[in-house]
Structure formats: C-alpha cells, structure tokens
Image: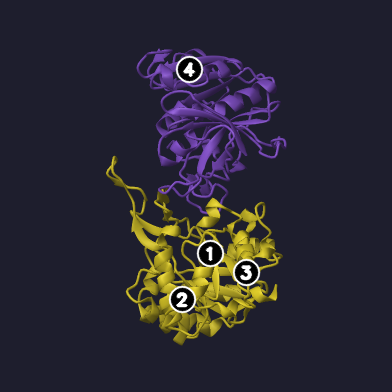
Chain colours: A purple, B yellow
Amino acid sequence: MVVLSNERLNDQNNLLKVTPATGEKLPDTVSPGQFVQIRIENSVHTFLRRPISVNFVHTSLNQLWLLVQNVGEGTKHLCNYSEGEKINIIFPLGNQFHLPSKVTSKILLIGGGVGTAPLLFLGKKATDNGFKPNFLLGGRSAKDLLQLDDFKKYGAVYTTTEDGTQGEKGFVIHHSILQEEKYDFIYTCGPKPMMVAVAKYAHENDIECEASLENLMACGFGACLCCIEKTTRGNVCACTEGPVFNIKELTWID
Amino acid sequence: MDRLKVSIGGLELKNPVMTASGTFGYGTEYIDFIDLSRLGGIFVKGTTLEPRDGNNYSRMAETASGMLNAVGLQNKGVTYFVQHIYPEIKQYDTNIIVNVSGSSVDDYVKCSERLVDLERIPAIELNISCPNVKEGGMAFGTSCDSAAKVVKAVRKIYPKTLIVKLSPNVTNIGEIARAVEAEGADSVSLVNTFLGMAIDAEKRSPKLSTITGGLSGPCIKPIALRMVWEVYHAVGIPIIGMGGICNWQDAIEFILAGATAIQVGTYNFIDPAASVKIVDGISDYLDRHHILSIDDLIGNLNID
C-alpha cells in the first residue's frame, strides 16, 4: 500500500489515507468493524504490528482510511508517514458489525474518542442499505470529536464532551437522546468503561447491542491466542471471532 | 533442491525451516499467506491430554525487540485434535509435528499414545519448558532427573521421532540435553521462551495477568544462539534451533552454531511469510558460497 495523505486532525489523531501501491482495486469484501495490521518500520522499541480499525473505504477513490491515535512509539511512527511512502498492511482482518434485518429498525452508533473510527464506515453502510442511523459521539473536549462533518452525511449526530465545550456535558451514556428515543439496535466502540456502560443500558432496555473490542494482540489472525475475550463460548480470539461481539456473548453483565 | 534436505532422527525434511509451536496455530491460520508445502515442517499448537482454557487476559506485552506471552497452553485437548483438527490438516504436504505438554508424566504418556497411530504425524515435540502453566511444563525441563523421567516414559510408547523442547531457564542447558539424549530422545529443540516480566509504571501493575511470562523475539537471539552452541558440544543428536529468528541470516547463524534445522517463531506474527522467505534466503546463501549440503554448515564455525 502507499500513503496518499496523513492529515493531523488534532493534537493526538491523524487520518491516514492509503491505496494499493499496484493500483489494483481494494477488495470489496472490506466491511465495517474489520481492522488492519500495520507494520512499524525502523522502530527499535516496538516489534509488533499495530491493529487499526477500518475508518472508511472510499470506493470510487479506491482509498482506505485509518484513524490513528498517537499514544505510543508505534502509533507515533504511523503519524509520521508522508505522502508517497510505502506502508506494509495486512487486511482485512476480523469479523464485522451486523445490521438488523428490517430497515425500519432504529439504530444508534455510539462512539468515544478514537473509538468512533469504525462507526463512520458502518454509518455509510447502514445508509446505503436504507437505514437512518443516529450517531452519539463523545470526547473529552470539542477538539476530540473527530470527523463530525463526515458523520453528518449519514445521519443525525449527537455529541457529549466531558468539559462541556460541545454538545451535552458529561459522558455519552448520560445524553438525553437515550431517554427520548427508543432504539432497536446499538453499535458501540470506544474505551471499555464506556462500552460496558452502553452494554448495560442496552441490556436493561432490551436493545440489541454489538460492541467492537480493542484487546491487545500480537498477530491479528488467530495464531498467537493473546487477544482472548471470555465469552459464553469460553475464551475466544478477539481478532478472528471478533472484534465485534454481541453483548449477549460477553461476560460484562452479571 | 536436495542440498537443502536434512534429517532429524527418522524424520526427513525437504529443508531446515520449520515453524515454532504456539506461533503458527495449526497451519490453517497461515494458508492465505504462504504455501505450507514450501516448509520443512510445522510444529502445531501445544496439545494436552485434557482441554485447557489458558490464562486470563491480558496475555501479551510488547517489549523492546520482542514480546512476553502468558497464553498458558490454551487448547481443546488431544481428543479434539485427533477427531477434528487432524482430519483437516493431514493433507498438508509438509511434516506436521505436534507439541505435547502435560502436568504429570502420565499426562505426557497418555497424550503421546493418542498421537502414535496418526499416519501423518511423524514426530512429536515434548514441551518440558512452558513457563506459563503452574503445574508441569517448565518444572519438568529444569532438572535433569525430571526431564529424564518424562522422556524415558514417553520413549517406551512412542517409536517415531521424539523431539524434546528445552527450557533456557536453567543454569546448564547442556546437562539437560545430555539427560534427555541418554533416555533416547532423537533430537532436542531449543530454546523455549525466557521467563520475564513487564510492569506498567503509571498503573503500578504487572502487564500480564500471570505477572511473569515467556519472552521471545529477536531480543533473545544472542542467548539462544549461545545455548545452541553449548548443546551442540554436549550431545550427538540433531538440534533444532530457535529464538528470535527473523531472516535467513539468523537461520544460517543458528546452523553454524550447531543446529540441523531451525524454527521461526514470534516473527511469524510480524511477517506471516517470513518462513518461506528464509527458505529462499538459505538457498541463495548455499549458491553464493558453493555449499553442496546443509550438513556441511552445521556447527562449522571458523574459529581461529
């Protein structure tokens, strides 16, 4: 793959757009919820690839978008890639989000921080399939809410910030829309405490819910058995059986 | 390509490059990336008599040039392997070797017995060196007596090629190698992971649920190489070398230190096609140096 652009969105996040170096078409099997494993070149202190979820696939421009949060040595390298550089990516990996069978179902996509990444692609797929998705996106501050203009193309966007600089003040789980609307399906990705709170809300209100996990992994394709999640089926690899799980399979709620 | 051929006991390998247990699943995880028939063999996931859930999350911590793991031998047990996995993988055109682990001598014997009659499994690797289980595993590999006991018991019931995987967490690895050779092991493979630890300074907590785990990757290569060299001078049986091998140069270094064959381990996670690239690299090396057989390289280090 080759880097087309690497735009800094805020002090911590970059939007990396890549395309196949050979000019071939991106596989049309890439689905919302899937992820890629990017090799980190020339970094002494890192060794493993970095798993990054697919943010968006722009079919007509043949672009794969990846939202990268600069949190350590490996992701710092990714944020420093420049246009034209080759980048070694294994993809697509993992399973995907499942849309409801009825297009009349009301769906809400809840994301926090960089966890909003896969929800943009899911929002597009939902819209393409006739759904009218709503988005509830949270961050610490207004500057942490990413790609809002892109999200708005696919549905109503509600926001929360911890400091109140945009949208309702507080966490996503406290947003008034959750009291006002009754959704049939919720899809969530973000920090684990947020996802657990969302899962509890969904469970208590009898709403179907899928969560995308970010367990630490080495390989990303089911060989190392490091990223396991405890489920009703026992310990399973989050990379191959997930990263998307129905919350009924997880052991988050007693 | 005959010059790439080597043998380990009764096992004929088309080339000396194999993949390490615990890093290669059952081979099926890699068929999108490589042609398994290009490899000398694959060592499949550690198998135990009874199913094991393995350790709790988190099981992995990245380290400088390596990683720690604490998987803890998660597997569905030997019965499941024989009934469900073996029928799926037996058609692979490479040597399939099962890594066997246990908590008692009896476990090793019973598990090995279940594998004897599998036509397409020409060898087993006794794992007496897993650092991530409370009972058994490494406990057997860190004393000559217990290592000898396991090998002696399994040797009685397992007539095919018997490889013993050694722990590096010992004072004198040559002594352990001699002890298992004396009980009839056909080969030793080394090294398994080094016991290590990683701490999150901010949280003041260990990064692994088990606190300690097994260190692997290029950071262990110099120590692994030294241990292969020591064992080469301690035993007469062939050695399968491993520990941080990432490329053909690393592989040649292990062969020069005394290994007859090598295993690629953790690096499979970074480059799933690394093992096949290493086969090609070794072949080029033999061409450039006009070497007619791998056997001419084994332990053939120029020392003034």
Position in image of residue A140 (x %, y %): 38, 22
Instruction: Look at 58% across and 66% down and name the residue there.
Output: B18
Residue B117 visible? The answer is no
Please give the chain letter of the residue carrying mark 4. A
Q: Quadrant of the N terminus of chain B?
A: bottom right
Sort mark 4 into few (<14), some (14-19) or many (20+) by Cα contacts within 10 Å.
some
User: What residue type is disc 1 on?
Assistant: Gln
**Element on which disc 4 rests:** helix
Please give the chain letter of the residue carrying mark 2. B
Q: Which mark is residue B4?
A: none
Real-space CA distance between mark 3 and mark 4, rounded to the nearest whole angstrom: 70 Å
Tags 4 and 2 on a common chain: no
Tags 3 and 4 on a common chain: no
Q: Which residue is mark 3?
A: B288
Q: Which residue is mark 1?
A: B249
Tags 2 and 3 on a common chain: yes
Q: Residue furthest bottom?
A: B182
Position in image of residue A18 (x %, y %): 60, 33
CB under 8 Å between discs 3 and 1 = no
Sort mark 1 into few (<14), some (14-19) or many (20+) by Cα contacts within 10 Å.
some
Badge nearest the viewer, 2 or 1:
1
